[in-house]
Image (cartoon, rainbow, N blue to C red):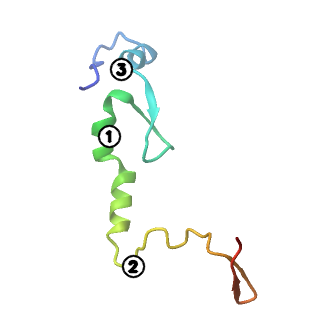
Amino acid sequence: STCPTTSSSLLSKQNQASKRGKRIPCPLDKNHTIYECNLKAHLRKCNKAKDKLSVKAMIYYKQNVNKGGYGIQTCGSTSTST
């Protein structure tokens, strides 16, 4: 479903926002919010989604390569902790 339109100039911005529904954080990028009713459409066009896909397409990209958790590196030797 889509959000109701808010073309009337008589409505205040606050009133328009309440008619469009609840704003939620974008699941791909918490730095911006979207209207809950626009979630499906937003996920298709969000720039953060496009960025992630383009990075994964790079030939040198390997997911989780710098994730860590493989021991402690000290003075050139590797020791594992249990």
Residue at (46, 47) in percent of width and height: 29
Q: CA distance from mark 1 to mark 2?
A: 29 Å
**Pointers 3 and 1 in contact (C-beta within 8 Å):** no
Upstream in the sequence, badge 3 or badge 1? 3
Taking 61 as reference, is 39 above or below it? above
Q: Secondary structure at mark 3?
A: helix
- In this rendering, would 65 be left or right of 38? right
For label 3, the residue is 20
Taking 4 as reference, is 74 above or below it? below
**Pointers 1 and 2 in contact (C-beta within 8 Å):** no
Q: Quadrant of the C terminus?
A: bottom right
Q: Nearer the viewer, residue 49 or 70?
A: 70
Residue at (62, 69) in percent of width and height: 69
**Pointers 2 and 3 in contact (C-beta within 8 Å):** no
Residue type pointed to by label 2: Tyr
For label 2, the residue is 60
Residue at (38, 29) in percent of width and height: 35
Q: Residue 57: give x, y in percent of width and height.
A: 31, 69
Q: Nearer the viewer, residue 44 or 5?
A: 44
Q: Residues within 10 Å of mark 1 (few under 14, many from 20)?
A: some
Residue type pointed to by label 1: His
Residue type pointed to by label 3: Arg
Q: Residue furthest bottom?
A: 76
Q: Secondary structure at mark 2?
A: loop
For label 1, the residue is 42
- In this rendering, would 21 be left or right of 78? left
Q: Residue 78: give x, y in percent of width and height.
A: 68, 84
